[in-house]
Amino acid sequence: MKFFNVKMLAALVAGVGIFTTGAVSAEIALRFGYEAPRSDTQHIAAKKFNELLAEKTKGEIKLKLFPDSTLGNAQTMIAGVRGGTIDLEMSGSPNFTGLVQKLNVIDIPFIFKNREHVYKVLDGEIGQGLLKELEAQGLKGLAFWDVGFRAFSNSKHTVTKPEDIKGLKVRTNQNPMYIEAFSLLGANPVPMPLAELYTALETRAVDAQEHPIGIFWSSKLYEVQKYLSLTNHGYTPLIVVMNKAKFDSLSPELQNALLDAAKEAGNFQRDLNVKNEQEIITKLRKDGIEVTEQVEPASFKAIIEGKVRKSFIDKNGDELIKQIDALAK
């Protein structure tokens, strides 16, 4: 009888061990949405993010990827993450400025000198402080990824100076910094989601748009635009966010894995964008697009920089701008 009890106890312990092991290693599937198509580096980096998470969590966290605006446009997805129906989302920083007004500082035209300056700001105290501001809105900012320095395209003529933009209907995002900037240049800014842009350009509902050349290429906007100028009038980062309550519910180990993997995938994507840029320009020229690489920024800055900076300062003070300017030196 004693032998039987020992056997029964061993079996019970083994069963509990199996159950416990299964519970610990249960897969956490997270829905991750974004507007960019599968051909864009955002999707490639999202797959890298998934691979890194699998390594760091031993398969405990897995991402379900939803590119191509499958889960809606940026504003719809951000609302979904805040409400908990979507776990993670990434979109350009201008899409978050309605929630955190200070994020507008990133979109002040010509505020960044070069990529080195960008990374000092975003990866340092300034950028991490801006991500922290999102937490009050139910969002956990995991990392800044890359959209890039913005270029200007249109279907009318070559653009090398401010007068060339005057009178054009320009698709831009809803960020007030860009709306004001293009208004000052004499254009008619028309905010709209990326998913609607191709058709708007094709039907001539708008004449022009401004995105980094990676988006211009991956979204095939070159099919409905003839002229591209590398104006570099602003830099836009992606912000990868997660539902804060979901993030807080995870163990510290899994939280750190998410943060580390997001940062590594972001660095991977930044490098990929820089590497691809010249190759894209070559392909665009072969497809008949007129690409103007040398655009003198001084004349554009003279019209828009001071006034747009003042608009930000009037609402948010000048401390952030001073800190960003100091890192350029």
Image (spheres, rainbow, N blue to C red):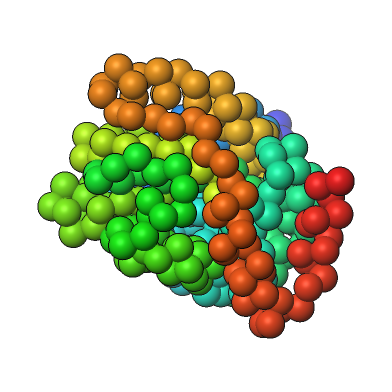
> Can residue 87 be seen from the camera position used here?
yes
Residue nearer the viewer, 40 or 289: 289
Image mark count: 0
Q: Considering only vertical position in the picture, is 216 above or below 298?
A: above
Residue 200, image x, y percentages: 20, 55
> Can residue 21 be seen from the camera position used here?
no
Residue nearer the viewer, 120 or 248: 120
Q: Residue furthest bottom?
A: 314
Residue 12, image x, y percentages: 63, 41
Q: Which residue lies furthest to the left in this view?
A: 203
Q: Considering only vertical position in the picture, is 245 above or below 161?
A: below
Residue 30, image x, y percentages: 48, 49
5 left or right of 158?
right
**Residue, x 55% and y 54% (percent of image)?**
300
75 left or right of 27?
left
Q: Considering only vertical position in the picture, is 237 above or below 167?
A: above
**Residue, x 30% and y 28% (percent of image)?**
289
Residue nearer the viewer, 169 or 190: 169
234 left or right of 13?
left
Residue nearer the viewer, 111 or 119: 111
Residue 53, image x, y percentages: 60, 35
In the picture, which quadrant includes the N terminus? top right
**Residue, x 40% and y 18% (percent of image)?**
282
**Residue, x 41% and y 55% (percent of image)?**
163
